[in-house]
Structure formats: C-alpha cells, structure tokens
DNA sequence: GATTATGCAATTGTCGACAATTTTACCGGA
DNA sequence: TCCGGTAAAATTGTCGACAATTGCATAATC
C-alpha cells in the first residue's frame, strides 16, 4: 500500500500533487484570509506552473474537504461553520469508537508502546502547558489506534473527517482550555486498550463519548468568540485577525 | 443546499461533470470489462471532447471511489476485492447505526409514511420474487432514515461508502439469496423507528447488527464464485461473463 | 433617487500541441 | 530458449491560447 501508515512517503511524482501538498499545509496553517480565494492566475504566477496542475491540485484539496469548488465561480477555502462542527464530531466519534474497538481486538506490544510514548509526551506537554506539543502528541495518539484497527477504508475516512475540522492554529487555542481534563481521559483510554480483558463495548463507548464530550466543550469555547457575530457563524478567520 | 435530497437536480453545468455522470452510470451498470481501462484517447473520441474535461471527470470519479488514478499510469475502474467488502461493511454499519439513532430522535410522520411505502414495495417485491424492485425499494428505505438523521456530512459519507460496494448488477444476485430474511429484519427496524419509546441504543445496534450480518451472508454468497479463483480475489467481472 | 439595462473586465472552461515517461516490441547475446 | 538492452510506440503530464460565462461598473430610464 502506498498510503496507510499515516505518512505519505511515496515519490512525489506529479506536479499537481506537490502543489496540493503545499496548499494543504498553507490552508491548515491558516495562511489564507477570510475563507475564500484561490484564484488560478495568482497561484499560477506564485508557483510558476500552468493552470492544468493547479486545477488538479484543487480537485485533490476538494477530496480532502479543504476547499469548495463552485462551477464557473472558482475554488474557495472551506469556511468552517458551527454547524459543520456539530455534524463532524458525532460522525468522527462513531468511527473512532469503532476503530478503538477493532484496535483492542488486534492490539500488539509495538503499538501499545508507541501509544505510551505519545501519552508520555502529552503528559510532559501538559505540565509545561505546551499546547502545540500536546496537540501533536494527541493527534498521534489517535492515529496510532486508528491505524492499529487494520481497516484501511476506516483509516482513510477518518483521515478526511479529522482533517476538515483540525484547522491547526484553531485547535491550539481550544486545547489550552482544559488540557488536563483531556489528558486524564486519554490515560483512561490507554488503560482500557492495554488490558486484554477490557470489554469491547466499554472501549468503544469510552472513545465515542470522549469525542462527543469534546464537541460540547468546543462549542462552549466557540461561544466566547461569537459575541459580535450572528447568523452565519463563520468561525474561520475571527480567531487570528 | 444544492444536494442532500438524494437527487442531484442542480444544473449540469460543466462538461467534465456530465462525462463523470455518464461514466458513473456506465461503471455501476457494469459496462466495463475486467477492472482496468479508461484510456483518455478512447474516451476522447467517444465523447468528442478534449482531454481536460476527461481528466476532471476522472478526479470526480475518484472522489466517489469508483476509479483509481495511478500517476503516470492511468485511470482504472476500481476492482472490488473481498478485502474491500470486509472493510466496507463495518464502517457502513457503524454510520448507519448512528444515522438510525439520530433519525429516531427526530422522526416525523412524513418520513415514516415514506418508509412504510418503501417497506410495502419491498414486501410486494418479495412475494413476486422481483429482486430488482426489492433492491431499489431497499435502497430507498435506507436513504430515507439516513436523510432523516439531518446530518449532511453523515449523509455524504454514507453515500460514498454505499456507492463503492453497490455495484448494481452485482448486488442483485445477492439479494436473491435470502430476500425474506432481509424483509423481516427491515420490518423490525421500521417498528423500532416508528415507536417513539424505543431505546436509541437498541435501534442503533439493530441496524448495525443487520449490516454486519449481511456481510457474513455476502461473503458466504461470494464463496460460491471463488472456486476457480485464488489469491487476489478480483470478484469484479466474473459474475457477468 | 432607485432600479434595471448594457458593456467591459476578470475569471473559469475547453482545446490542441508539445514534453516526459512508461510500456511494448524488437534485437542481440548467452 | 531465455534473458537483457535498446528503440519505437503509446500514454500521461504540462503548457499556452482561445472561448464562454460571470460579476461589476457605468449608464440610462422610470
């Protein structure tokens, strides 16, 4: 398999794919205004390529859910609304719960030790209040048991779902809220996955419940930034400008 | 919303989208050989268009999971393997279970009556042994409560998951196996959704279990056609040639 | 003054051609 | 006969240009 290990290390053949990767990073880092742009002419000059690979890159980004292509109008970076978040979390929760259950059934020592490392990094980051490190270690923690589930389709589906809402510098501020509470829950998840005699249903509902709880916290966190907004609830660029 | 009602009635602007739609139907109907082709030159002559919209159509089909694009090699119609099916069903089961639970919480009379109609059609088709009618009514039954869940992301995700494995003339033969057993289960699902006092967890596990059970039956059904094959288990074209 | 019509500018959609790569066919040698 | 290498053919990737549509600004009319 070319992908499935979480790292895309296959030869970066294809100009469009390279541009897609660059744009993907740029979008996730937040290096784009409001929520709408990506003119072909601008990027053509910026990357020094023709429009063909650009359009291909746009399709690739659309597959990831990072942009929205409107015919005869253009390509726009997707603006995350409150409703998008409310829809995303339950779906993610159900699938990550399934992944945890599957991972428990096939758990091995290697994955377990990697998860322990991630958990340790999360713990260290928590006491140092290093939100960025905690965030990345936390991402890896989840990726590990998702991969351990051994279902490539599930892994790919979750990758897309997790990417959409994880506008990075967006989540940083969120985790700063209750980093210790998050750490405690993940320690419980680890204990359940570590114990071969854990009930599959318990693990599943634990992970699923954790994500659904995170939704409530996230929405509560969002409310603080919505005092001057109303209606559409763009959510996207208000945090950084 | 342009989509979400199950029917894409928006203006078919865009040559690439039209070609994608035509190819999508052709693939689902089985009008393609083995499991690999889609040469740009052939289709260019067949549709009378340039290669640009063709390549766009390929990306669209890849988004739906109907083809696989290999860089510098070409576009190939995805060949469904036994492993693909084994991976698809659990994911679909988890999400449809979630959809059923959400649908139950927001169920209304209109959707309920539509589901009753679909169920009636399934019942009639069952006694007449009309597999094709049963199959389509069955599809609509599922679409109805998935839509009732009111989660567009969930609906889109399931649409992709359900499309990948529902190579149509492929499923027909399967339902012929135990159409009555399938009907009974869907009647139970309907009864649970109809009753406002049903337990959410019961509905969810009922739907999820139904799909996971179908996987076993499906694999058993497949075994009959795998007596002369071994290893890769292509599954794709053997049924029609 | 507000609203609708019209022309222009900007952007996307499509096309044909050239470049790069892969596959295949042919040839030579062991 | 089989294996390796080279060259040709076929296919995909990329490019620049033209066509079509959309949006905006200006102007005209009620």
Image (cartoon, coloured by chain):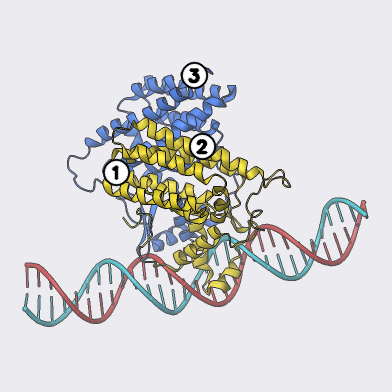
Chain colours: A yellow, B blue, C cyan, D red
Image quadrant holding the N terminus of chain B, namely top right
Which numbered marker is on residue A46? Answer: none
- Mark 2 belongs to which subunit? A
Judged from the image, the secondary structure of the residue bearing numbered disc 2 is helix
Image quadrant holding the C terminus of chain B, namely top left
Name the residue at 32% across, 54% down. Answer: B36
Image-quadrant location for residue A224:
top right
Judged from the image, the secondary structure of the residue bearing numbered disc 3 is loop
In this rendering, position of residue A95 left or right of residue A47: left
User: Are there few (<14), some (14-19), or many (20+) residues within 10 Å of tag 1?
Assistant: few
- Mark 3 belongs to which subunit? B
- Mark 1 belongs to which subunit? B
Question: Of label 1 and label 3, which has the lower sequence position?
Answer: 1
Report x, y in % for residue C18: 44, 79
Report x, y in % for residue D5: 19, 79
In this rendering, position of residue B20 left or right of residue B38: right
Name the residue at 58% across, 24% down. Answer: B108
In the image, is residue A156 above or below residue D14? above
Residue where numbered disc 2 is placed? A212
Residue where numbered disc 3 is placed? B198
Report x, y in % for residue A150: 32, 45
Q: Are the residues under badges 1 and 3 in a single subunit?
A: yes
Closer-to-camera residue (A55/A93): A93
């Amino acid at each position: 398999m070319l992908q499935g290990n979480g790292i895309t290390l296959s030869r970066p053949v294809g100009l469009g794919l390279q541009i897609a990767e660059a744009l993907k990073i740029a979008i996730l880092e937040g290096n784009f205004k409001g929520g709408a742009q990506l003119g072909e002419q601008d990027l053509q000059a910026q990357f020094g390529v023709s429009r063909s690979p650009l359009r291909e890159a746009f399709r690739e980004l659309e597959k990831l859910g990072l942009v929205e292509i409107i015919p005869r109008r253009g390509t726009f970076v997707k603006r995350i609304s409150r409703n998008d978040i409310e829809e995303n979390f339950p779906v993610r929760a159900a699938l990550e719960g399934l992944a945890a259950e599957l991972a428990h059934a096939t758990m091995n020592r290697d994955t377990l030790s990697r998860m322990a490392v991630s958990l340790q990094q999360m713990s260290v980051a928590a006491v140092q209040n290093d939100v960025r490190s905690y965030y990345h270690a936390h991402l890896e923690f989840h990726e590990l048991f998702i991969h351990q589930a051994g279902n490539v389709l599930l892994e790919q589906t979750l990758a897309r779902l997790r990417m959409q809402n994880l506008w990075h510098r967006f989540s940083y501020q969120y985790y700063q809220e209750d980093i210790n509470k998050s750490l405690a829950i993940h320690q419980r998840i680890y204990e359940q996955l570590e114990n071969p005699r854990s009930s599959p249903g318990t693990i599943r509902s634990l992970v699923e419940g954790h994500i659904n709880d995170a939704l409530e916290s996230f929405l509560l966190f969002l409310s603080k930034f919505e005092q001057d907004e109303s209606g559409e609830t763009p959510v996207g660029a208000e945090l950084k400008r």
